[in-house]
Image: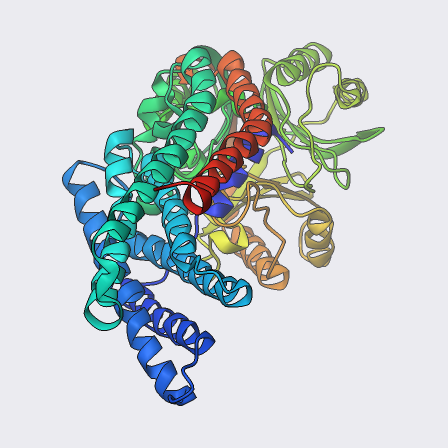
């Protein structure tokens, strides 16, 4: 699995939270139950269990529930008024409910221990829990809302202050009128000092992990995190602005095949050496669909040799790919000459080869072995070698991207797979008979499936190429790779159709990678339904067959702003180093600060 996709896998922690009304209802119920349990622990002999539970529930409802609901509303208003992002009311209420539950559990534990050891340390437990949720809230606000630390730390005070204030008020009115006075001063001092200790530890921790990002990449780690969450929750593309700070302009190529019928271009088959990432709708993640939609005819955008180093930093960069293809189409020369589709194998490498006019297409796969992206330099080597061996002008290299498992690795210079690819190209027979050509096309958005099943916006596109007496199906899913073994299952399922050869490909779109994991390959679920779409597409494409002329092209894409090989590696290494350092620093700083706060609350003070 590529490192960038490991980072993309962090998206699994972004979940859909419950609606606000359900969170509030849950807070009311939980606070009532916690309060009831709290009173039952200290059951007064003259009062019944039901009566105690009712009174305790009302106490918990007032001190925990009402205070936390108020803080949820206030937190959201404060953050929004100070131009923070991401914190919608449902997020704020959910955060308050988590904090309230943590505090309630601490209150019960404190009261149980107080009864067991016969020493009143219940208030100390409550203060310690307030310090804990204060730090937790501050960290969440600072890390996700794109606000200053002082704003986050101030907003984080709202919930613990409201809960302590409500506890003091209830205690003064109904239980203990001596609560006001020296005890209140002592509580305030303990809470303030402990809160400062803990929140300063959080500040130090964030500054430590943020330093490598600022130094190496010139970006703020909290800005990166906040804008990533904004994209996941709202579809905001503001994160592309951060990518600009670390972008690198590159030159790459796009190769294509154009099929022209009686009424002009009937179909385009494009293989750009640009990677459709990083994830969601950011950068070039939806490139296969966006690029195809820029042309008025049937267009398949396959996965060319490229890795996450070649992720465009913004959607607008896709315009440069379109411009290169259009330049190439103006130069293209057409003929009726095409060869049959022939497969070649060398060790792990398998290719399907077909000649079109003065060019050729090479569909590369390692199935049933699992691999990830073919690196651009490896792709260039394949192009140069195939052009030389077969005396063609253009070589369209396609990474079929159709066999995946979680351990899949990229095909990089120095890997054995590179020599397998070189070896299999050396087996190509350049002397092929040429025939007239027909093609038929069909596309289906696969509306009954979506990202949960690994299906992107373009669904499935199928092109049948008839040369002589042979029919070959090029089947392209808008998906990020394919579950290992599913390719063969599809091939077997259509073995009795009126076709002689078939290859199944995916676009490697990364729009599907926002659901549950870094990768989300097609074929994990609903295989039978997907296969029915394949059968339908082949049937319809066969009905669409018509004579065409064909031509190929290769064009450079200049000044394409991408992550770049240096910055992409730097980003991954920085994240890896930060994670490694955090495993040591976080426990030392946070646990130590909590320990000091605990000692101060329980054994310090006046």
Q: Position of residue 165 (x, y in %)?
A: 23, 56
Out of 523 and 140, give the one closest to the viewer.
140
Q: Could you tell me which quadrant the N terminus lies in?
A: top right
Out of 366 and 297, give the one closest to the viewer.
366
Q: How is the image coloured?
A: rainbow
Residue beneath the point at 78% across and 22% down: 429
Q: Could you tell me which quadrant the C terminus lies in?
A: top left
Identify the image quadrant of residue 180. Answer: bottom left
Q: Position of residue 39 (x, y in %)?
A: 40, 75
Residue beneath the point at 57% across and 24% down: 581
Residue beneath the point at 35% across and 39% down: 195
Out of 327 and 112, give the one closest to the viewer.
112
Identify the image quadrant of residue 86. Answer: top left
Q: Please say whether residue 243 is visible from this viewpoint.
A: yes
Q: Position of residue 350 (x, y in %)?
A: 76, 32
In this rendering, the answer to whether 567 lies above or below 91 is: above
Q: Position of residue 398 (x, y in %)?
A: 61, 29
In this rendering, the answer to whether 413 lies above or below 545 is: above
Out of 159 and 455, give the one closest to the viewer.
159
Identify the image quadrant of residue 524. Answer: bottom right
In this rendering, the answer to whether 219 lies above or below 67 is: above
For this orientation, the residue located farthest to the left is 81
Q: Please say whether residue 296 is visible from this viewpoint.
A: no
Q: How many marks?
A: 0
């Amino acid at each position: 699995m590529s490192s960038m996709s490991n980072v993309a896998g962090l998206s699994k922690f972004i979940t859909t939270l419950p609606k606000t009304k359900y969170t509030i209802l849950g807070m009311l119920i939980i606070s009532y139950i916690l309060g009831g349990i709290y009173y039952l622990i200290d059951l007064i002999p003259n009062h019944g269990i039901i009566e105690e539970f009712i009174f305790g529930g009302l106490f918990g409802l007032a001190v925990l529930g009402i205070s936390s609901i108020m803080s949820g509303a206030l937190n959201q208003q404060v953050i929004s008024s100070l131009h923070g992002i991401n914190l919608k009311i449902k997020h704020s209420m959910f955060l308050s409910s988590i904090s309230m539950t943590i505090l309630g559990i601490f209150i019960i534990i404190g009261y149980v221990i107080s009864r067991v050891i016969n020493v009143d340390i219940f208030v100390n437990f409550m203060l310690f829990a307030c310090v804990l949720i204060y730090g937790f809230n501050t960290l969440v606000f600072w890390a996700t809302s794109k606000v200053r630390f002082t704003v986050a730390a101030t907003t984080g005070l709202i919930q613990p202050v409201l809960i302590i204030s409500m506890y003091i008020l209830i205690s003064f009115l109904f239980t203990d009128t001596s609560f006001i006075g020296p005890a209140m001063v002592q509580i305030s001092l303990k809470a303030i000092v402990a809160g400062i200790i803990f929140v300063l530890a959080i500040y130090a921790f964030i500054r430590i992990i943020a330093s490598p990002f600022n130094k190496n990449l010139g970006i703020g780690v909290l800005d990166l995190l906040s804008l990533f969450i904004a994209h996941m929750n709202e579809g905001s593309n503001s994160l592309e602005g951060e990518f600009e700070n670390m972008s690198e302009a590159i030159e790459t190529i796009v190769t294509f095949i154009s099929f022209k019928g009686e009424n002009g271009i009937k179909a385009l088959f494009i293989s750009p050496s640009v990677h459709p990432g990083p994830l969601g709708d950011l950068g070039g993640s939806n490139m296969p669909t966006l690029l195809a939609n820029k042309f008025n005819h049937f267009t398949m955008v396959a996965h060319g040799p490229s890795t996450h180093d070649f992720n465009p930093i913004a959607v607008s960069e896709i315009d440069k790919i379109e411009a290169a293809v259009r330049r190439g189409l103006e130069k293209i020369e057409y003929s009726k000459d095409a060869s049959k589709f022939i497969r070649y194998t060398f060790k792990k490498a398998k290719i399907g080869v077909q000649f079109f006019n003065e060019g050729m297409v090479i569909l590369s796969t390692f199935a049933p072995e699992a691999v990830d992206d073919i690196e651009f330099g490896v792709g260039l080597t394949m192009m140069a070698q195939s052009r030389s061996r077969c005396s063609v002008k253009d070589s369209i290299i396609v990474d079929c991207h159709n066999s995946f498992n979680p351990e899949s690795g990229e095909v990089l210079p120095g890997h054995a797979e590179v020599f397998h690819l070189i070896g299999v190209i050396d087996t190509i027979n350049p002397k092929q008979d040429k025939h007239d050509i027909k093609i038929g096309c069909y596309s289906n958005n696969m509306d009954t499936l979506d990202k949960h099943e690994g299906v992107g916006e373009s669904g499935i596109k199928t092109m049948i190429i008839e040369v002589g007496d042979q029919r070959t199906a090029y089947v392209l899913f808008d998906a990020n790779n394919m579950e290992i073994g599913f390719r063969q299952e599809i091939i077997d399922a259509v073995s009795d159709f009126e076709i002689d050869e078939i290859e199944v490909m995916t676009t490697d779109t990364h729009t599907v990678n926002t659901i549950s994991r870094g990768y989300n390959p097609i074929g994990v679920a609903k295989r039978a339904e997907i296969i029915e779409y394949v059968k339908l597409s082949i049937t319809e494409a066969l009905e669409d067959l018509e004579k065409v002329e064909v031509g190929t092209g290769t064009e450079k894409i200049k000044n394409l702003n991408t992550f770049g090989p240096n910055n992409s590696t730097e980003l991954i290494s920085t994240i890896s180093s930060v994670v490694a350092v955090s495993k040591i620093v976080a426990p030392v700083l946070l646990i130590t600060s909590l320990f000091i706060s605990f000692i101060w609350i329980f054994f310090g003070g006046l």
